[in-house]
Amino acid sequence: MLGLLNSRLLFAYLKSRSNVFRGGWITRTKQYVGPLPIRLVENNRQEEFVALVEKVLELNKKKHSDKLAPSGLDRLDREVAATDFEIDTLVYEFYGITDEDRAIIEGSAQ
């Protein structure tokens, strides 16, 4: 569920229906999160999806450990971004999103 909620797809959906505040912050109350179109992850991709979400959680934990040199932090940022990209790719696949739709979604999510 965490991987879906943090995906670019569901963030774009939420942002399009939520209140947007200064700095790009959005309302994430039950009123807006409740109607999100949550789909179950396909069984044949579930392990892969869960592993990616666990990986990004672990990377973020390392990132905020205050034990990294700037070069290590840059490397972790790139690894988090790459893992997020993999998660988003799977989420787009789960929802049947085309490459053209993905470009539109990612343009609106920023």
Image (cartoon, rainbow, N blue to C red):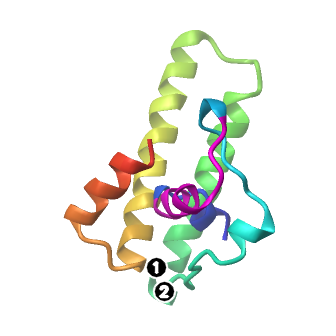
Residue found 51% across the figure and 64% down from its top: 13
Could you tell me how far apart the alpha carbons at marks 1 and 2 are, in whole angstroms? 5 Å
Q: Quadrant of the C terminus?
A: top left
105 vs 22, nearest the viewer? 22
Q: Residue 43 appears at what percent x and percent y?
A: 51, 88
Q: Residue 72 appears at what percent x and percent y?
A: 55, 19
What type is the residue that disc 2 sits on?
Glu
Q: Residues within 10 Å of mark 2 (few under 14, many from 20)?
A: few
Farthest left residue in view: 100
Q: Residues within 10 Å of mark 1 (few under 14, many from 20)?
A: few
37 vs 70, nearest the viewer? 37
Marks 1 and 2: CB-CB under 8 Å? Answer: yes
Residue found 58% across the figure and 67% down from its top: 4
Identify the element where label 1 is drawn.
helix
Residue labelled with disc 2: 42
| Predominant SS of the magenta segment | helix
Residue labelled with disc 1: 45
Farthest bottom residue in view: 43
- Taking 32 as reference, is 45 left or right? left
25 vs 84, nearest the viewer? 25
Choose top left, top right, bottom left or bottom right for residue 37.
Answer: bottom right
Q: Residue 106 appears at what percent x and percent y?
A: 36, 51
| Membership of 108 in magenta stretch | no
Identify the element where label 2 is drawn.
loop
| Magenta stretch bounds | 9-21
Q: Quadrant of the N terminus?
A: bottom right
Residue found 48% across the figure and 50% down from its top: 84
- Taking 75 as reference, is 57 left or right? right
What type is the residue that disc 1 sits on?
Arg
Choose top left, top right, bottom left or bottom right for residue 34.
Answer: bottom right
Residue found 52% across the figure and 69% down from its top: 49
Vertical placement of 42 versus 93: above or below?
below
